[in-house]
Amino acid sequence: MFDRLKEDIRCVKERDPAATSVLEILFLYPGLHAVRSHRRANWCYRHNLHFTARWISQRSARKTGIEIHPGADIGKRLFIDHGTGVVIGETTEIGDDVTIYQGVTLGGTGKDVGKRHPTVGNNVMIGAGAKVLGPVKIGDNTKIAAGAVVVHEIPPNSTAVGVPARVVKQDGIRVDNLDQIHIPDPTAQEIERLEKMIRDLADTINK
Protein backbone atom coordinates (compact mmCIF):
# COMPACT_ATOMS: atom_id res chain seq x y z
CA MET A 1 0.00 0.00 0.00
CA PHE A 2 2.76 2.44 0.94
CA ASP A 3 4.77 1.53 -2.16
CA ARG A 4 1.74 2.34 -4.36
CA LEU A 5 1.21 5.64 -2.52
CA LYS A 6 4.86 6.63 -3.06
CA GLU A 7 4.51 5.68 -6.73
CA ASP A 8 1.38 7.85 -7.04
CA ILE A 9 3.07 10.83 -5.43
CA ARG A 10 6.19 10.42 -7.55
CA CYS A 11 4.20 10.40 -10.82
CA VAL A 12 2.46 13.66 -9.84
CA LYS A 13 5.76 15.28 -8.94
CA GLU A 14 7.32 14.21 -12.25
CA ARG A 15 4.43 15.47 -14.41
CA ASP A 16 3.31 18.63 -12.63
CA PRO A 17 5.91 21.42 -12.40
CA ALA A 18 3.59 23.29 -9.99
CA ALA A 19 3.93 20.56 -7.34
CA THR A 20 6.28 21.89 -4.67
CA SER A 21 6.25 19.21 -1.98
CA VAL A 22 5.12 15.71 -1.08
CA LEU A 23 2.74 17.08 1.56
CA GLU A 24 1.09 19.39 -0.97
CA ILE A 25 0.52 16.47 -3.35
CA LEU A 26 -0.70 14.16 -0.60
CA PHE A 27 -3.24 16.55 0.92
CA LEU A 28 -4.17 19.04 -1.80
CA TYR A 29 -4.31 17.19 -5.13
CA PRO A 30 -7.87 16.05 -5.93
CA GLY A 31 -6.69 13.79 -8.75
CA LEU A 32 -4.60 11.75 -6.34
CA HIS A 33 -7.53 11.43 -3.91
CA ALA A 34 -9.90 10.40 -6.71
CA VAL A 35 -7.58 7.66 -7.97
CA ARG A 36 -6.96 6.29 -4.50
CA SER A 37 -10.69 6.31 -3.70
CA HIS A 38 -11.33 4.51 -6.97
CA ARG A 39 -9.04 1.66 -5.94
CA ARG A 40 -11.17 1.05 -2.84
CA ALA A 41 -14.40 1.37 -4.83
CA ASN A 42 -13.13 -0.97 -7.53
CA TRP A 43 -12.19 -3.61 -4.93
CA CYS A 44 -15.74 -3.47 -3.55
CA TYR A 45 -17.21 -3.58 -7.06
CA ARG A 46 -15.20 -6.68 -7.99
CA HIS A 47 -16.40 -8.37 -4.78
CA ASN A 48 -20.07 -7.62 -5.59
CA LEU A 49 -20.35 -4.89 -2.95
CA HIS A 50 -21.91 -2.60 -5.54
CA PHE A 51 -23.76 -0.27 -3.17
CA THR A 52 -20.62 0.32 -1.10
CA ALA A 53 -18.59 0.81 -4.27
CA ARG A 54 -20.97 3.48 -5.57
CA TRP A 55 -21.10 5.16 -2.16
CA ILE A 56 -17.30 5.48 -2.15
CA SER A 57 -17.19 6.75 -5.74
CA GLN A 58 -20.00 9.29 -5.28
CA ARG A 59 -18.48 10.58 -2.05
CA SER A 60 -15.19 11.02 -3.88
CA ALA A 61 -16.96 12.81 -6.77
CA ARG A 62 -18.54 15.31 -4.34
CA LYS A 63 -15.16 16.00 -2.72
CA THR A 64 -12.97 16.15 -5.83
CA GLY A 65 -15.23 16.98 -8.80
CA ILE A 66 -13.92 13.81 -10.50
CA GLU A 67 -16.41 11.02 -11.18
CA ILE A 68 -14.94 7.56 -11.78
CA HIS A 69 -17.33 4.62 -11.97
CA PRO A 70 -16.14 1.87 -9.61
CA GLY A 71 -16.23 -0.64 -12.48
CA ALA A 72 -13.59 1.21 -14.51
CA ASP A 73 -10.28 -0.66 -14.90
CA ILE A 74 -7.38 1.72 -14.25
CA GLY A 75 -3.69 0.92 -14.53
CA LYS A 76 -0.70 2.29 -12.64
CA ARG A 77 0.36 5.92 -12.27
CA LEU A 78 -2.77 7.60 -13.65
CA PHE A 79 -2.35 11.37 -13.19
CA ILE A 80 -5.51 13.49 -13.29
CA ASP A 81 -4.28 17.10 -13.39
CA HIS A 82 -6.67 19.73 -11.95
CA GLY A 83 -9.46 17.24 -12.53
CA THR A 84 -12.68 19.21 -12.22
CA GLY A 85 -15.35 17.78 -14.50
CA VAL A 86 -13.54 14.54 -15.36
CA VAL A 87 -15.97 11.63 -15.95
CA ILE A 88 -14.83 8.01 -16.47
CA GLY A 89 -17.45 5.42 -17.37
CA GLU A 90 -18.06 1.91 -16.07
CA THR A 91 -16.40 -0.18 -18.80
CA THR A 92 -13.49 2.17 -19.39
CA GLU A 93 -10.04 0.58 -19.44
CA ILE A 94 -6.98 2.77 -18.84
CA GLY A 95 -3.39 1.61 -19.18
CA ASP A 96 -0.30 2.73 -17.27
CA ASP A 97 1.23 6.23 -17.15
CA VAL A 98 -1.82 8.04 -18.54
CA THR A 99 -2.35 11.77 -17.99
CA ILE A 100 -5.84 13.29 -18.08
CA TYR A 101 -6.65 16.99 -17.78
CA GLN A 102 -9.79 18.74 -16.54
CA GLY A 103 -13.11 18.38 -18.29
CA VAL A 104 -12.27 15.08 -19.98
CA THR A 105 -15.06 12.55 -20.53
CA LEU A 106 -14.36 8.88 -21.19
CA GLY A 107 -17.99 8.05 -21.83
CA GLY A 108 -20.55 6.17 -23.85
CA THR A 109 -22.69 7.05 -26.85
CA GLY A 110 -25.89 5.51 -25.49
CA LYS A 111 -26.00 3.14 -28.47
CA ASP A 112 -23.65 0.39 -27.30
CA VAL A 113 -24.22 -2.53 -24.95
CA GLY A 114 -21.68 -4.50 -22.95
CA LYS A 115 -18.39 -2.74 -23.56
CA ARG A 116 -19.67 0.84 -23.83
CA HIS A 117 -16.67 2.98 -22.93
CA PRO A 118 -13.15 3.63 -24.29
CA THR A 119 -9.97 1.61 -23.95
CA VAL A 120 -6.97 3.87 -23.42
CA GLY A 121 -3.44 2.51 -23.95
CA ASN A 122 -0.24 3.21 -22.04
CA ASN A 123 1.47 6.61 -21.89
CA VAL A 124 -1.51 8.49 -23.34
CA MET A 125 -2.21 12.20 -22.78
CA ILE A 126 -5.80 13.47 -23.07
CA GLY A 127 -6.08 17.26 -23.18
CA ALA A 128 -8.52 19.50 -21.33
CA GLY A 129 -12.15 19.21 -22.39
CA ALA A 130 -11.58 16.27 -24.75
CA LYS A 131 -14.36 13.69 -25.12
CA VAL A 132 -13.67 10.05 -25.99
CA LEU A 133 -17.00 8.33 -26.62
CA GLY A 134 -17.96 4.73 -27.15
CA PRO A 135 -15.90 1.50 -27.11
CA VAL A 136 -13.09 3.04 -29.14
CA LYS A 137 -9.39 2.31 -28.64
CA ILE A 138 -6.68 4.91 -28.09
CA GLY A 139 -3.28 3.44 -28.93
CA ASP A 140 -0.16 3.65 -26.76
CA ASN A 141 1.90 6.86 -26.71
CA THR A 142 -0.93 8.92 -28.21
CA LYS A 143 -1.91 12.53 -27.55
CA ILE A 144 -5.51 13.74 -27.78
CA ALA A 145 -5.70 17.52 -28.17
CA ALA A 146 -7.74 19.78 -25.91
CA GLY A 147 -11.37 19.95 -26.99
CA ALA A 148 -11.13 17.00 -29.39
CA VAL A 149 -14.07 14.61 -29.75
CA VAL A 150 -12.91 11.05 -30.42
CA VAL A 151 -15.48 8.63 -31.83
CA HIS A 152 -13.16 6.36 -33.85
CA GLU A 153 -10.04 4.35 -33.04
CA ILE A 154 -6.80 6.31 -32.81
CA PRO A 155 -3.65 4.28 -33.65
CA PRO A 156 -0.54 4.18 -31.43
CA ASN A 157 2.07 6.96 -31.49
CA SER A 158 -0.40 9.51 -32.87
CA THR A 159 -1.63 13.03 -32.24
CA ALA A 160 -5.35 13.61 -32.84
CA VAL A 161 -7.17 16.96 -32.95
CA GLY A 162 -10.55 18.34 -33.97
CA VAL A 163 -14.26 17.54 -33.94
CA PRO A 164 -14.49 14.75 -34.82
CA ALA A 165 -10.87 13.98 -33.98
CA ARG A 166 -8.48 13.27 -36.85
CA VAL A 167 -4.91 12.03 -36.72
CA VAL A 168 -2.48 14.80 -37.69
CA LYS A 169 0.78 13.11 -36.71
CA GLN A 170 1.81 9.47 -36.50
CA ASP A 171 5.20 8.03 -35.56
CA GLY A 172 6.54 11.58 -35.51
CA ILE A 173 5.52 12.30 -39.12
CA ARG A 174 2.93 14.92 -40.05
CA VAL A 175 0.02 13.26 -41.89
CA ASP A 176 -2.39 16.22 -42.04
CA ASN A 177 -2.21 19.99 -42.04
CA LEU A 178 -4.57 20.39 -39.07
CA ASP A 179 -3.56 21.84 -35.73
CA GLN A 180 -5.37 22.95 -32.59
CA ILE A 181 -6.02 26.44 -34.03
CA HIS A 182 -6.78 25.83 -37.70
CA ILE A 183 -9.49 23.21 -37.25
CA PRO A 184 -12.00 22.91 -40.10
CA ASP A 185 -15.60 24.01 -39.51
CA PRO A 186 -17.84 21.09 -40.59
CA THR A 187 -20.84 23.42 -41.07
CA ALA A 188 -18.87 25.70 -43.38
CA GLN A 189 -17.56 22.67 -45.27
CA GLU A 190 -21.11 21.37 -45.83
CA ILE A 191 -22.32 24.79 -47.04
CA GLU A 192 -19.38 24.94 -49.45
CA ARG A 193 -20.23 21.45 -50.74
CA LEU A 194 -23.89 22.40 -51.31
CA GLU A 195 -22.94 25.64 -53.05
CA LYS A 196 -20.69 23.69 -55.43
CA MET A 197 -23.52 21.26 -56.14
CA ILE A 198 -25.85 24.16 -56.96
CA ARG A 199 -23.25 25.71 -59.30
CA ASP A 200 -22.75 22.36 -61.05
CA LEU A 201 -26.53 21.94 -61.50
CA ALA A 202 -26.87 25.48 -62.84
CA ASP A 203 -24.05 24.86 -65.32
CA THR A 204 -25.79 21.65 -66.49
CA ILE A 205 -29.15 23.41 -66.95
CA ASN A 206 -27.62 26.33 -68.87
CA LYS A 207 -25.82 24.09 -71.36
Image (cartoon, rainbow, N blue to C red):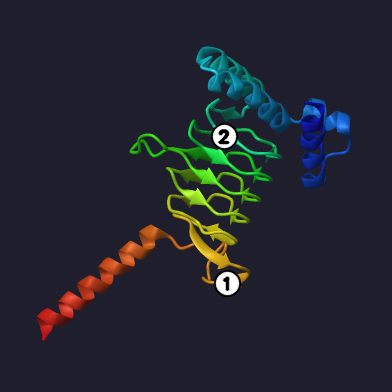
* Residue found at the very far bottom of the displayed protein: 207
- Residue ID at (77%, 32%): 4
Q: Tag 2, which secondary structure?
A: strand
Q: State the residue in front, 141 or 150.
A: 141
Quarter of the image with the N terminus is: top right
Q: Position of residue 188 (x, y in %)?
A: 38, 62
* In the displayed structure image, the side of residue 53 where residue 29 appears, left or right: right
Quarter of the image with the C terminus is: bottom left
Q: Tag 1, which secondary structure?
A: strand
Q: For the residue marked with disc 1, what is the amino acid?
A: Arg
Q: State the residue in front, 173 or 181.
A: 173
Q: Is residue 24 above or below residue 203?
A: above
- Residue ID at (54%, 49%): 147
- Residue ID at (45%, 43%): 133
* In the displayed structure image, the side of residue 33 where residue 132 appears, left or right: left
Q: Is residue 133 above or below residue 197?
A: above
Name the residue that disc number 1 marks.
174
Report whether residue 80 is seen.
no
Q: CA distance from mark 1 to mark 2?
A: 32 Å
Q: Residues within 10 Å of mark 1 (few under 14, many from 20)?
A: few
* In the displayed structure image, the side of residue 90 where residue 6 appears, left or right: right
Q: Earlier in the sequence, mark 1 or mark 2?
A: 2
Name the residue that disc number 2 marks.
73
* In the displayed structure image, the side of residue 164 where residue 161 appears, left or right: right
Q: Position of residue 3 (x, y in %)?
A: 81, 31
Q: Is residue 1 above or below residue 140?
A: above
Q: Position of residue 130 (x, y in %)?
A: 54, 46
Q: For the residue marked with disc 2, what is the amino acid?
A: Asp
